[in-house]
Image (tube, helix red, strand yellow):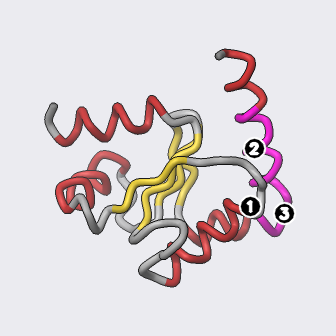
Amino acid sequence: MNVLEKIKSQIEENPILIYIKGSPDAPECGFSAQAVQALSSCGEKFAYVDILKYPEIRTELPKFANWPTFPQLWIEGELIGGCNIIMEMVSNGTLKKLIKETVIKYKKNK
């Protein structure tokens, strides 16, 4: 599986996925830490990929997503955005709503 196929597979297999530097327990940049904290505050499980462990994903994902920075939040195969967008969604209540709706839909489809 090449890098692009791997990225597509990760996005397809995980309804809520965030690409970050580090892990949710030990983020390795301030933006990743903020994004993980915001996502965690929604109270649902999510998948993550530590791009520091996968330099090929770190290189190819920005081209694939047409989004140059990390973190990157993907929900149901759609790029939601990075830290600023995530934080804006937290402040206006749309992140929690979107996460809850996705979890409900995913549980119904299982």
Residue drawn at x 72%, y 35% is 103
Task: Classify mark 3: residues with Cα within 10 Å, few (<14), some (14-19) or many (20+).
Answer: few
Q: Which residue is mark 2?
A: 98
SS at mark 2 in the image: helix
Give the structural element (helix, strand or loop) at label 3.
Answer: helix
Q: Along the horizontal axis of the image, is 92 left or right of 40? A: right
| Three-letter amino acid code at the position of disc 3 | Asn
- Report the span colored magenta: 89-103
Residue 53 location (% of width, % of height) = 26, 63
Quarter of the image holding residue 89?
bottom right
Which of disc 2 and disc 1 is earlier in sequence? 1
Residue pointed to by mark 3: 92
Residue 56 position (above or below residue 71): above
User: Residue lying farthest top?
Assistant: 109
Instruction: State the residue in front, 78 or 34.
Output: 34
* Residue 99, placed above or below residue 71: above
Q: Are marks 3 and 2 in contact (CB under 8 Å)?
A: no
Please state if 64 lies on the left or on the right of 83 as rendered: left
Q: Count of labels shown?
A: 3
Query: Circle 1: is it few (<14), some (14-19), or many (20+) Cα within 10 Å?
Result: some
Residue 26 shown left or right of residue 58 in the figure: right
- Amino acid identity at mark 1: Met
Q: What is the quadrant of residue 28 in the picture?
A: bottom left
